[in-house]
Image (cartoon, helix red, strand yellow):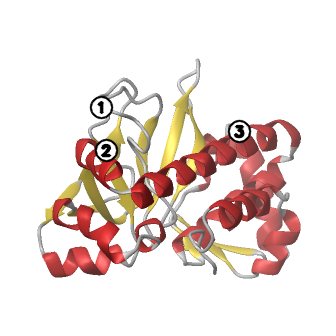
Amino acid sequence: MVAHYESSTLIDTLLSGNNLLSALRGPDLDLMRPHFRALQSASNTVLYDPGENVQTVYFPCHRTLVSFLVSTDDGSAIEALLVGREGAVGGIVSQGNLPAFAKIAIQTGGDLLCIPVSVLDDCKERSRAVENLFARYADCLVAQMFQTAACNAAHSIEQRTAKWIGAAIERSGSREVPLTQERLAAMLGVGRSYISRVIGTFKLDGTLAVRRGHLVVKDEEKLRARSCSCHEIVKQHFNTVLHGVYPET
C-alpha cells in the first residue's frame, strides 16, 4: 500500500531524512525540489517487479528500508541489496526507461521521496554536482553487491545473520527490526531451521530479543562480534567515496 502526499512542508522534512539528498548543496537540490513527491509505504509493498520499466527513483527516508530481491529456480527471493536513508533505488544512472532486473520491495515501511527518472536525468545534465553524486553512489551500490556475493560464498549463516541485522539497525537508526525469522531465512537463502538455531543462540547470550514479528538488538557489541567484516568494508567504501552519507548509529 502506498499513500501519496503533496505537502511542501512534509517534503522539506523528508529531504533531511535521506542522507544522499542531504549531501547536495542548496542550488543543486533546488533543481530537484519542485519535482519530489512524498510517499508513505507499508512493509512488503513492491515498487518494481522484474521486467517493469523503471520510471521513478525512490529515496528511503528516516527508518524506511528497501530490498533488492533476486528470484531463484525454486521460487525463493534472496536479497542482493539493502538500501536505507543512505541511498536511492530505481534509475540511478540509467538514461530513459529500462527494465528492472530484480524485485524492489519495501522491507521496513515508512516515508519515501520519489522523482521521475527523466527529471533526475535532466538535473544531472544541468548540474555536475548532481551527476557526480549519483555516479559515486552507483559505485557504492556495485561495491555492496560485490561484497554481498563474496559474503554469501565465504561466511557462515551466523555471521551473515549478524551482518544483516547490524546493517539494518544502522540504516534505520532503530534497534528494533520488524522482520520474522521466516522472512530473514528466505532473504539469506537458508533454511528456516538454521535461522531458528542462530537466533536462539543470539537470544541465549543476550545479543537479541524476539517479539512477535520483530527482532530487537539488546547488545550491539555482541552483534558486531558475531558478524563478519563485510558490513564494515561496505561502510568504509561509502565513507571514502561519499563521506557522511552512510548512517552512523
Marks 1 and 2, Cα distance to the nearest angstrom?
A: 8 Å
The percent coordinates of residue 32 (x first, y second) are 25, 62
Relative to residue 248, is residue 113 depicted above or below? above
Residue located at (71% from left, 64% from top): 240
Near mark 2 (Cα within 10 A), the count class, few <14, some 14-19 or many ≥20, is some
Give amino acid for label 2: Asp
The percent coordinates of residue 217 (x first, y second) are 67, 76
Q: Which image quadrant for residue 163?
A: bottom right
Do the residues bearing badges 1 and 2 touch, measured as CB atoms within 8 Å? yes
Q: Quadrant of the C terminus?
A: bottom right
Residue located at (40% from left, 27% from top): 50
Q: Name which of mark 1 and mark 3 comes first in the sequence.
A: 1
Residue 191 shows which numbered tag? 3
Q: Is residue 167 left or right of residue 157?
A: left
What residue is disc 2 on?
121
Relative to residue 248, is residue 45 depicted above or below? above
Residue 96 shows which numbered tag? 1
Give amino acid for label 1: Gly
Residue 203 appears anywhere in the view: yes
Marks 2 and 3, Cα distance to the nearest angstrom?
A: 42 Å
Q: Which image quadrant for residue 36?
A: bottom left
